[in-house]
Image: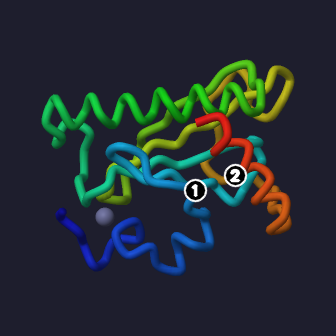
C-alpha cells in the first residue's frame, strides 16, 4: 500500500475535503462526490494507492480500475439520467491517479464539449442536498 504524505488523496487533507466528500470504497478505488455540483452527480474516483499514471498499473490493476469506472458511470447514469457520462483523467499537476466522472445533460453546461474542471460560479449545496445525491449514487451502485 504505497502512500505519499504530501498527497491530498493519500492524506485526505483539508484541500481534498474542501473539494470532495468520500462516498465509499470500491474494489480498487475510493469514490468521492465533487462538491462543485455544476454537473449534477459529478464524482471523482481515486486509485487506492499512490500511483502516478494509469500505465503504471499492472494489466490486472488497470482492469480493476476500469471496472470501478464502469460501475460508477452506470450508477450515475441510473441515478441522474444524463445524456452522457464523461470520463477525464488529466492530473498534469498531481501524482495520484484519479478519474473525473462527469454526467452531461443535453442543453446543459458544456454539453457537446469538454467538461470544465472548476466551472464558476460553483454550485455548492447544503449538507442535506449532498447526502441526497450520495444516497442516490449508493443506491445505484
Ligand atoms: Zn497519493
* Residue at the (86%, 23%) spot, across then down: 107
* Residue at the (77%, 32%) spot, across then down: 80
The residue furthest front is: 139
Q: Quadrant of ligand 1?
A: bottom left
- 133 or 114: nearer the viewer: 133
Residue 26, percent from left and from top? 42, 46
* Residue at the (45%, 42%) spot, across then down: 99
* Residue at the (21%, 37%) spot, across then down: 61
Quadrant location of the N terminus in the rendered image: bottom left
The span from disc 2 to disc 1 (Cα, nearest Å) is 7 Å
Residue 120 position (above or below residue 19): above
Residue 82, percent from left and from top? 75, 25
Q: Secondary structure at mark 1?
A: strand
Q: How is the image coloured?
A: rainbow
**Neighbourhood count class around disc 2 (C-alpha, 10 Å): few under 14, some 14–19, many 20 upward:** many
Q: Earlier in the sequence, mark 2 or mark 1?
A: 1
- The quarter of the picture where residue 131 lies is bottom right
- 127 or 123: nearer the viewer: 127
Q: Secondary structure at mark 2?
A: helix
- Residue 23 marker: 1
User: In screen coordinates, is 57 left or right of 54?
Assistant: left
Residue 59, percent from left and from top? 16, 29
Quadrant location of the C terminus in the rendered image: top right
Does any portion of residue 62 appear in the rendered image? yes
Q: Which residue is mark 2?
A: 134
- Residue 68 marker: none
User: In screen coordinates, is 77 left or right of 121?
Assistant: left
- The quarter of the picture where residue 50 lies is bottom left
Residue 48, percent from left and from top? 32, 55
**Neighbourhood count class around disc 1 (C-alpha, 10 Å): few under 14, some 14–19, many 20 upward:** some
- 71 or 126: nearer the viewer: 71
Amino acid at each position: 500500500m504505497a502512500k505519499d504524505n504530501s498527497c491530498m488523496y493519500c492524506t485526505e487533507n483539508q484541500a481534498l475535503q474542501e473539494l470532495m466528500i468520500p462516498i465509499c470504497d470500491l474494489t480498487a478505488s475510493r469514490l468521492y462526490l465533487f462538491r462543485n455540483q455544476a454537473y449534477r452527480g459529478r464524482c471523482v474516483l481515486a486509485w487506492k494507492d499512490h500511483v502516478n499514471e494509469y500505465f503504471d498499473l499492472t494489466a490486472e490493476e488497470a482492469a480493476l480500475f476500469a471496472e470501478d469506472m464502469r460501475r460508477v458511470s452506470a450508477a450515475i447514469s441510473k441515478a441522474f439520467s444524463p445524456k452522457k457520462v464523461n470520463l477525464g483523467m488529466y492530473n498534469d499537476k498531481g501524482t495520484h491517479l484519479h478519474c473525473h466522472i462527469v454526467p452531461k445533460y443535453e442543453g446543459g453546461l458544456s454539453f457537446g464539449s469538454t467538461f470544465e474542471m472548476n466551472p464558476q460560479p460553483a454550485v455548492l449545496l447544503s449538507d442535506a442536498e449532498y447526502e441526497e445525491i450520495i444516497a442516490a449514487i449508493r443506491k445505484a451502485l
